[in-house]
Amino acid sequence: MYDYRPMYGGAFYDPEPAGGQVTSLTLYSGPDRATTVTATGPATRLRAGVYRFALPDVPAGRYWATVVFTPSQGAQPVQDQSVRLDLPLGLGLVTSPEAVATELGATLPLTAEQRDDLLTAIRKAQADVVGYLGQPVIPRIVTGSALAPRWNGELEDVDTWPFETDDLVHVVSYRERQDGTYDVDFLLGLDGAAVEPVVRYVTTHAAETERNRPGGVGAQGRRVSSVSAEGQSISYEAEPTAGQAGALPTLDSLSRWKRRLFQPLNQPARAPWPYSSSRGRR
């Protein structure tokens, strides 16, 4: 499955309320989009601005795609050629072996052995992120059964439903039951694949780990800047320091998504009003 967000006029757009439709997705083997691999469609609307395609089985690798949709009823079809897919999806990772290979400058397509090595490097980098943030970077889907909306609002809005959680939560889909209630699928937790700083950290650190691993994909060891004529001295390139262009991102760059732990302070009971202030001391 691939969840697509239509792009129209440089902004995310939902065509269905205007009578439009997301009609097809075509996969190509190269960025020139000359050789067609397969096509699928139409898409199913999950929620406002999100449409799901059922992808056919294709070999693992990188594909370029074109999505066709009509922005409104009677309008001419629009082609979105900004889509690039690294398949298969749904591996529980925030990035792909192809993205890491591109960072390394390795040639695509990958062999099965290269793909396995890069998957291992991704899992290691992703584990570092999970340890720092104190929470998983892969969300989970929880279904609430027989829920009645609190008010007649947008059913895609999580506040519409009587569902309490301390995690980040989004409505994925909902299905009406015969008694007027709904079964609602909620996405709980941090969706790291949708957070660009998380994706960049995992991708670049997985690439750097593999680059410095003996025999790794794209392994080069330390970058040599010069060697003396006699071969008796070697100079290495200095890596950019944190904050400079080209430097590896640090875990501190992800602090915004770090789980915060709160512990209530034990305070003595206050005397009743009017013998004490109406506000508690902090």
Image (cartoon, grey):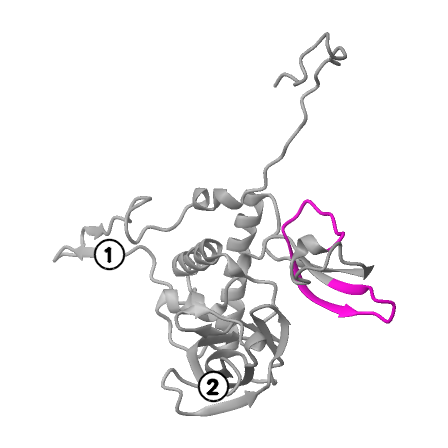
Identity, as a three-letter code, of the amino acid under mark 1: Val
Report x, y in % for residue 29: 44, 86
Quarter of the rendering occupied by the N terminus:
bottom right
| Label 2 secondary element | loop
Q: Is residue 168 magenta?
A: yes
Q: Residue at coordinates 24% horizontally, 51% vertically from top-left?
A: 236
Quadrant location of residue 59? bottom right
What stretch of residues is rendered in magenta? Answer: 161-184
Q: Residue at coordinates 63% horizontally, 16% vertically from top-left?
A: 281
Quarter of the rendering occupied by the C terminus:
top right
Q: Residue at coordinates 56% horizontally, 69% vertically from top-left?
A: 49
| Label 1 secondary element | strand
Front residue of 145 and 83? 145
> Upstream in the sequence, badge 1 or badge 2?
2
Q: Residue at coordinates 17% horizontally, 56% vertically from top-left?
A: 227
Q: Residues within 10 Å of mark 1 (few under 14, many from 20)?
A: few
Residue 218 in view in this figure = no
User: Vertical placement of 15 versus 218: above or below?
Assistant: below
Q: Which mark is residue 161?
A: none
Report x, y in % for residue 115: 51, 71
Residue at the far right in the pictured view: 179
Identity, as a three-letter code, of the amino acid under mark 2: Ala
Give the residue number, with chain letter if any, for mark 1: 224
User: Vertical placement of 166 versus 65: above or below?
Assistant: above
Numbered disc total: 2
Residue 270 in view in this figure = yes
What is the CA distance from the residue labelled 1 to the residue labelled 2?
A: 57 Å
Give the residue number, with chain letter if any, for mark 2: 75
Quadrant location of residue 278? top right
